[in-house]
Amino acid sequence: MEGSQFISLVALFALLASSISSAYDPSPLQDYCVAVDNINDGVFVNGKFCKDPKLVKVEDFFFSGINIPREPVKLYGTRVNLLTADRIPGLNTLGLSQARVDFAPGGVNPPHMHPRAAEILTVIEGTLYAGFVASNQNNNTLFTKVLYPGDVFVFPFGLVHFQFNIGESNAVAFATFSSQNPGVVTLGNAIFASKPSIMPDVIAKAFQLDKNIVQELQSKKWTFNT
């Protein structure tokens, strides 16, 4: 290879490497970026305004009361208490969030997915039947396990999953997410309670249901367990 060609090739690789490295930075560029709401208080990073580091306090990294149970939502018999950067400002840019889930006997955390996070669930009290469904690529394989206090179960990124209290007493679990804003899509709400409603014929055809059943489901009162 002639010298000029070699130099041109090296320059091309250098340009590509520079483009790739400047396109994405996988880790924070500061010790912390405590979220604030007032634009005058800091700089905009990761969807939040960062507090001036000189004004950061230990309380920015602290939350108290996650040990307190919350009354389950009647429809599902569960309640999710989610802790994100909105409630612990110091979580901002760290790629983490956490939730406590309280289950009444027979309570269900209905089939749902987190579009931006994987989840690791730890059971503290009670007995849960938990599982997730693989994608079409893996034949929609169902993975389930009965979980007891001290057991841990992982739900992969973006897959449909659920938990159900099969015990006779209340149950408590803690979930940790690989995103500061995992998001949630509850399947029943998304299908039957969208605004505006999905055309019943679409759902009837897709789920092999009678149109009247679809319309009945769409007429029900749907809610969230947060």
Image (tube, grey):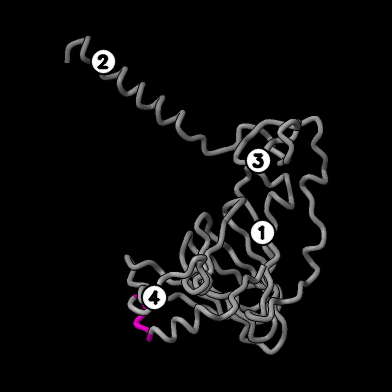
Q: Which mark is residue 13?
A: none
Q: Residues within 10 Å of mark 3 (few under 14, many from 20)?
A: many
Q: Which residue is mark 4?
A: 203
107 sits to left or right of 13: right
Q: Which of pointers 4 and 1 lies earlier in the amino acid sequence? A: 1
Q: Is residue 124 found inside the magenta-colored segment of the image? A: no
Question: Identity of the amino acid at label 3?
Answer: Lys
47 sits to left or right of 160: right
Q: Residues within 10 Å of mark 2 (few under 14, many from 20)?
A: few
Residue 209 image-quadrant placement: bottom left
Q: Which mark is residue 98?
A: 1
Per the image, label 2 sits on a secondary structure element best described as: helix
Q: Relative to residue 30, is residue 95 depicted above or below? A: below
User: What is the span of residues highlighted in magenta in the rendered image?
Assistant: 206-210
Question: Identity of the amino acid at label 1?
Answer: Gln
Q: Which of pointers 2 and 4 lies earlier in the amino acid sequence? A: 2
Q: Which residue is mark 2?
A: 8
Per the image, label 3 sits on a secondary structure element best described as: strand
Question: What residue sits 32% from the left and 24% below the top?
Answer: 13
Question: What residue sits 62% from the left and 70% below the top?
Answer: 224
Q: Which mark is residue 48?
A: 3
Q: Quadrant of the C terminus?
A: bottom right
Per the image, label 4 sits on a secondary structure element best described as: helix
222 sits to left or right of 124: left
Question: Identity of the amino acid at label 4?
Answer: Ile
Question: Identity of the amino acid at label 2?
Answer: Ser
- Judged by depth in the image, the label closer to the viewer, 3 or 4, is 4
